[in-house]
Image: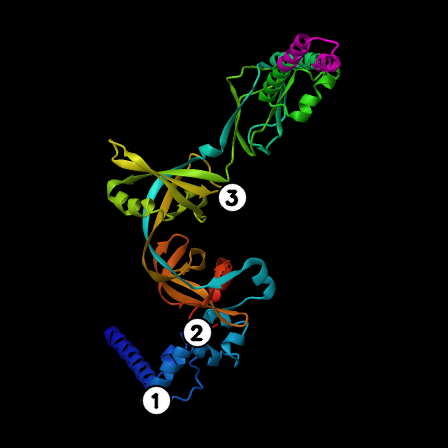
Amino acid sequence: MNNKRVLGFIIVIAAFAAGMAIREISRSSANPCAGCQDADPCCGSDTDHGSDLEGQDAHDDCAASCSEGQPENLEAATCEHQIRIIDCDNCRYEAGVVKITDSLSNALIQTGLVEDIERKTVLKFTGQVQLDRTRTVDVVSTGSGRVEQVSKLLGERVDKGDVLAVIHSADLGQVKADYLEVQANLDLTQATFNREKELYEEKITSQADYLKALNEMKAAQASYAAADRRLRLFGLGTEQIAGIKDEKENGEFASLILRAPQAGTIIAQDISVGKMVETRESLFTITDLSNLWVWCDIYEKDLATLHEPFEQGQSLNAVVQVNAFAGSMFEGVVDLVGNLMDENTRTVKIRVQVKNPENKLRPGMFAEVAVMIPGQGHITAVPRNAVMSDAGNFFVFRHLKDDLWIRNDVIPGQNQGGFVEILKGVSKADRIITGGAFMLKSEVLKEKMGAGCAH
């Protein structure tokens, strides 16, 4: 009895399922878009599909009208609010269209054109960031003595001529005393010569006395010039030398002022108040960090590719990246290819001069370097910051019209320094967003972007 009840229940369920299937088939035959309305509501239930064949064609046209990157279709497509989808503040994002206000565009968004650039061969190396030795100086004292004052400290930026420290130096005091002595002697010998000259011209004194006074004045002038040069070796200028007499009264006679020989950043310091210093000690190291070197090792197989254009004087541009600032690219140029090969590693050194305007790069960092070798032909390319990615798809934001921009899928090729080759998706002279595109790919907009205008 129980078995009969179970069997009857199964038969009822099967009959119900068969009825639902027949109903679905009938509905699909009457409306080819019924199955896609949830996925693509632009194919509305009020669309007149006509015959089966015409209905299928209408469905294809309707689906195409909501596809991204088709401006002519988007212009005509409407959303569930019965207005054009690009005009609907609630639905345009779902078709990949974004409206950018003037205030946002001027403040945070940068635009540019798809470019046609020269194709280049890219060689990739690893390297290490180091100081530019031509912009690095060690500051030493020109006289021994005791440190009285330290005005600048490690890590501070200085301008040329800034006071770094003050040293009480007996050496400088002695040179200044010698200068005052020879200056007094020069004044005396000049006065004597002038008197002897007048007497000689009046035939009152002999020629021998006149010549003796002349020789003594010339000797005094030579001693004065030597004393002046010694003072300048201590870093004194013309105005400071002229004021030496006054220093005898204000207690600065033996004060040796240590000044910055160039602008830059203090990266090393070995000085403190009270320390006795000598002329052979480096007290400060100052460097200009706005330009650095990146040394790379290249293997023999890459040397030939690099050697010919370098020897021909072609500019070999490079792009440097470091892990600390993965999203930043630092522009540089290869300015030296080594003449010796390391016998152990079988590599040759190359040097890249790299700009560091924001002081992000630090000497000692490991870096990845891409060197661009000029090649043949041209490619369509966009700035690397213009290309966004989402779920494995790459896209840019292309200008649609007025203040509307559309998400445009692209197929990227090789990186070309600061540019990316575009194999398909945009054309030369298309206007795209080159800076700030990440804002349009924020989490809020990302939830709304998609195919169709479903809610």
Q: Going from the N terminus, do you reach mark 3 or mark 2 first? A: 3
Mark-to-mark CA distance, 1 and 2: 22 Å
Structural crowding at the residue carrying mark 1, measured as other residues with C-alpha within 10 Å and reported as few (<14), some (14–19) or many (≥20): few
Q: From which residue to which does the magenta span run?
A: 190-219
Near mark 3 (Cα within 10 A), the count class, few <14, some 14-19 or many ≥20, is few
x, y (%) of residue 129? 41, 37
- Dot 2 falls on a residue whose secondary structure is loop
Which sits in the foreground, 370 or 339?
Answer: 339
Q: Nearer the viewer, residue 285 or 55?
A: 285
378 in relation to 197, above or below:
below
Q: Amino acid at mark 3?
A: Pro
Q: Is residue 419 magenta?
A: no
Q: Residue at x 67, y 22 (%)?
A: 241
Image position, residue 208 (x, y; %): 66, 8
What's the residue type where badge 1 is placed? Answer: Glu
**Three-letter code, disc 2:** Gly
Task: State which quadrant residue 413 falls in.
Answer: bottom left
Residue beneath disc 2: 452
Q: Earlier in the sequence, mark 3 or mark 1?
A: 1
Q: Earlier in the sequence, mark 1 or mark 2?
A: 1
Check disc 3 and report the residue beneath it: 357
Q: Identify the residue at horizontal 30%, vertical 35% (top origin).
A: 339
When asked about the image quadrant of residue 182, the answer is top right
Q: Which mark is residue 54?
A: 1
Image vertical order of residue 237 relative to residue 327, above or below:
above
